[in-house]
Image (cartoon, rainbow, N blue to C red):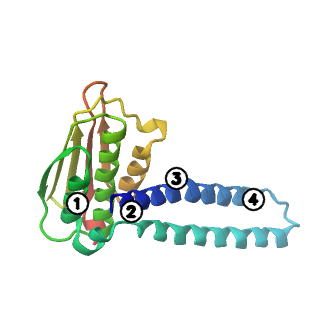
Amino acid sequence: MIAVDEARRRIERDLHDGVQQRLVALALQLREAEASLPPEMSEVRELLSAVTSGLTGTLDDLRQISRGVHPAILSQDGLRPALRTLARRSPIAVDLSLDLDGRLPEPIEVAAYYVVAEALTNATKHAHASLVHVTAAVWAGRLHLSVRDDGVGGADPARGSGLTGLTDRVEALGGTIMISSPAGQGTHIQVELPLERCN
């Protein structure tokens, strides 16, 4: 199951960071080409417009597919059991503190799951951490999520890591993410996700 979950995360990351970005770039190029055509080439402009619309529709379909690529336990049982499973399967120790009652909106659960999954992957592969603290709680209409490891620090979202994808995912839901990773002092990711926008 670990390999399956890792494969799902890799597929979604590839869709988001690879295929989707290429489609967006192509759509922008088509729009630029359409805008640069002289007025007498109206038929070509209409054709380019139709192709651009079709490409945009395909991109929307792909986004829906990529959102659906996540573990069955998350869909069936919710965030709390999914995070417990992540912690249990982690090769390093995970201290969980979950104050979650019932289900949250699916986009919130999916985003939170991938924040923790990516943080655990980074803590294992790059930070050489021995312990990760994960806390999740709901108050004031928001999910508050914190993931802190005791690794080497130095994580930099600007270098195009998986942290960039997490930032995009969180901000798309109207949430905020703060990443603190001073060298030698571990990495701390804090996320807030508003629940009312997803109800």
Mark drawn on residue 17: 3
Residue annotated with mark 1: 85
Q: Which residue is mark 2?
A: 4
Decide: marks 1, 4 in contact (CB < 8 A)?
no
Q: Residues within 10 Å of mark 3 (few under 14, many from 20)?
A: some
Q: Position of residue 38 (x, y in %)?
A: 85, 60
Q: Nearer the viewer, residue 26 or 70?
A: 70
Quadrant of the snapshot with the N terminus: bottom left
Is 151 rendered above or below residue 99? above
Earlier in the chain: of badge 1 and badge 2, it is: 2
Structural distance between the alpha carbons of marks 4 and 3: 27 Å
Amino acid type of the residue tagged 3 in the rendering: Asp
Q: Quickly name the residue at label 4.
A: 35
Task: Determine the image quadrant of residue 163.
Answer: top left
Measure the C-alpha gap from mark 3 to mark 2: 20 Å
What residue sits 76% from the left and 57% below the top?
33
Which-is-in-front pick, marks 3 and 1? Answer: 1
- 10 Å crowding of disc 1: few (<14), some (14-19), many (20+): some
Instruction: Pick whichever, 147 or 104, lies toward us.
Output: 147
What residue is at 31 percent from the left and 49 percent from the top?
A: 176
Q: Is residue 182 left or right of residue 27?
A: left
Of circles 3 and 2, which is in front?
2
Residue 64: x percent and y percent? 47, 70
- Tell me which label, 3 or 2, sits earlier in the chain: 2
Q: Residues within 10 Å of mark 4 (few under 14, many from 20)?
A: few
The x and y percentages for residue 99 are: 11, 58
N-term mark: 1 or 4: 4
Q: Secondary structure at mark 1?
A: helix
